[in-house]
Amino acid sequence: MRLVWPIVEALRQVDGWPCEHVAVCVTGAVEATRGDESRRFEWASVTKLASALAMLVAAEEGLIDLDEPAGPPGATFRHLLSHSSGLPFEAGAPISEPGKRRIYSNYGFEVAAALVEERSEMSFERYFAHVWQGTTLELRGSAGSGASGTLADLSVLAHELQRPARVADETLAEATAVQFPGLAGVVPGFGRQDPNDWGLGFELRDGKSPHWTGAGNAPETFGHFGRSGTFLWVDPVAGIALGALTDRPFGDWAIDAWPRLADAVLAEAAVSRGQTQGRG
């Protein structure tokens, strides 16, 4: 059963965030928003979630194969999306052999997008727009960080990651499973994690600590955050997703505020579900 919260106490926390503009949404088993749903925000690396979905569509259309060679010698498209190709953060020569380390790489997404461009015979921006038609989501420049959109667009992405319509269920399940297990690496802003598990464009919560999601989030939680002060996570065990768009760059404020909000939302959702089940 889907619930709609007319007033969500947990989301009131964002009123105290050090942002001029902020908008948040909860989707799934419960639905709620707070803030301006029409304002456009820069998504930064939350872009990777939308770009990864577009690349998975390309895989289903037969334009690319996840296990075909792509990027540096010995790497595949799968390596590029899971930050295990050995490519550095920005354009440059590999700094590790493929499959040896989890090196967070915007450049890897650019290389992947270029292959989709070549095969689709259109810019990745156009391909991205085709996949996300029906929204106001726009990609300008980087496939890893160049998207902008509204809270309504973020909500569409959240719903897609909960009940996919653009890709098959089994495709999303593969994309949110650990790729190349056991690799260590750094989660930007949160330090070295061993292991630093990642899916195909999706960061996986697993047992990472510290982390930008809440202590109450299930290990199966997946998503991404951006340096523009944005994030989206999906907790399939709780049956909800939480997303936020702000105009305040990521920093110490977010390291404190985001997990607190996550835990409050999860707790309130659990209470709401329990009350509804009791009435049933």
Image: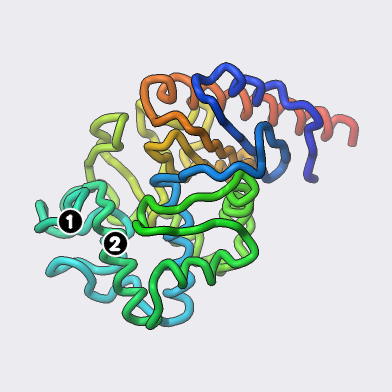
Residue projecting furthest to the top: 16
State the image coordinates of residue 255 (x, y, percent, origin top left).
41, 23
Amino acid carrying label 1: it is Ala
Question: Mark 1 highlights which residue?
Answer: 91
Residue lying at 21% horizontally and 48% vertically, measured from the top left: 89
Residue at 29 percent across and 36 percent down: it is 188
Cα gap from disc 1 to disc 2, whole angstroms: 9 Å
Task: Characterize the local packing of mark 1: few (<14), some (14-19) or many (20 or more) Cα atoms within 10 angstroms.
Answer: few
Q: Quadrant of residue 81?
A: bottom left
Return the mark for residue 110: 2
The tag earlier along the polypeptide, 1 or 2, is 1
Q: Is 243 situated left or right of 269 in this image?
A: left
Q: Residue at x 50, y 59 (%)?
A: 173
Where, quadrant-wise, is the C terminus in this rendering?
A: top right
Occupied quadrant, residue 136: bottom right
Locate residue 18 relative to residue 194 in the image: left or right. right
